Amino acid sequence: MHKMPLIFNRSVVVASVLLIFLVAMNSCRQKSSASNDSINIASTKIYTSEALGWQIEIPDSFQIISQDKMEAYDRQGQAIVGQTEEDYIEYDGLKYLISFGKDDFNIFAATAEPFELMYDGEYEDNNRLLNELIYQTFVNQGLTVDTVSGSIMIDQLEFMTFKTNIYSPDGDIIITQELFNRYINGYDFSVNLTYNNDADKTVILDAWEASTFEN
């Protein structure tokens, strides 16, 4: 039976492979680059996306991650997720918006990709398939995980959420990923948060939840 390609935001691949490599190589840390030539950041460290009408303030203790580094995760992720879905995934038009991190374990990353709706509910259907793909990707790599879906309001806009905890063999949580998705102005807008401690979790979530949209 022929499968239809997913209208796929590659940020899901980036997010998934990021966690896989962090778990596998948690002793190898690299400092994030503080420069990103593809975006303009004001002196107050406020990022603005005119296409989405979105603005977020970057926490003082976090550094901007270069687009080159995110693209490297992207390339690695395509290979890993390809083991799960073979050639049924389409990759097209991904825009890296802003990524910043405290270290390799505590990161915020936002992307957008054009998404043409063909029927009512298509975005929600696609998002459920992507959540299943994320879970299966982790399982295929031999990781112990649990997941939960939900929703959250950010500046009066509802986002779908998908949270994944990854566990050590001893049953302790190694790292957590939270994905937020919404259809905005013709784009699949995706935000990925990863963290491994409560202090950095609070800083990242506070920045995201305080961000604003032109409603």
Image (cartoon, grey):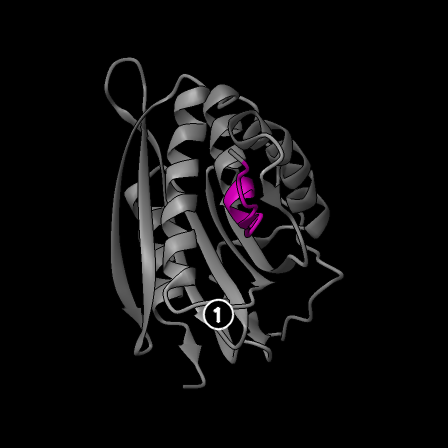
Magenta segment includes 9: yes
Image: 12 above or below 151:
above
Judging depth in this view, the residue of 95 and 64 nearest the camera is 95
Residue marked by disc 1: 57
Residue 35 as seen in the image, left or right of residue 54: right
Question: Residue 24 appears at what percent x and percent y?
Answer: 49, 20
Question: Residue 202 appears at what percent x and percent y?
Answer: 31, 54
Inspect this view and state whether residue 105 appears: yes
Judging depth in this view, the residue of 181 and 167 nearest the camera is 181
Name the residue located 58 percent from the left edge and 38 percent from the top edge. 88
Magenta segment includes 81: no
Which corner quadrant of the image does residue 133 belong to? Answer: top left
Which span of residues is magenta-colored? 2-14
Name the residue located 39 percent from the left edge and 57 percent from the top edge. 180
Residue 5 as seen in the image, left or right of residue 164: right
Question: Residue 178 appears at what percent x and percent y?
Answer: 36, 48
Name the residue located 57 percent from the left edge and 62 percent from the top edge. 112
Farthest residue toward the front? 1
Farthest residue toward the right? 37
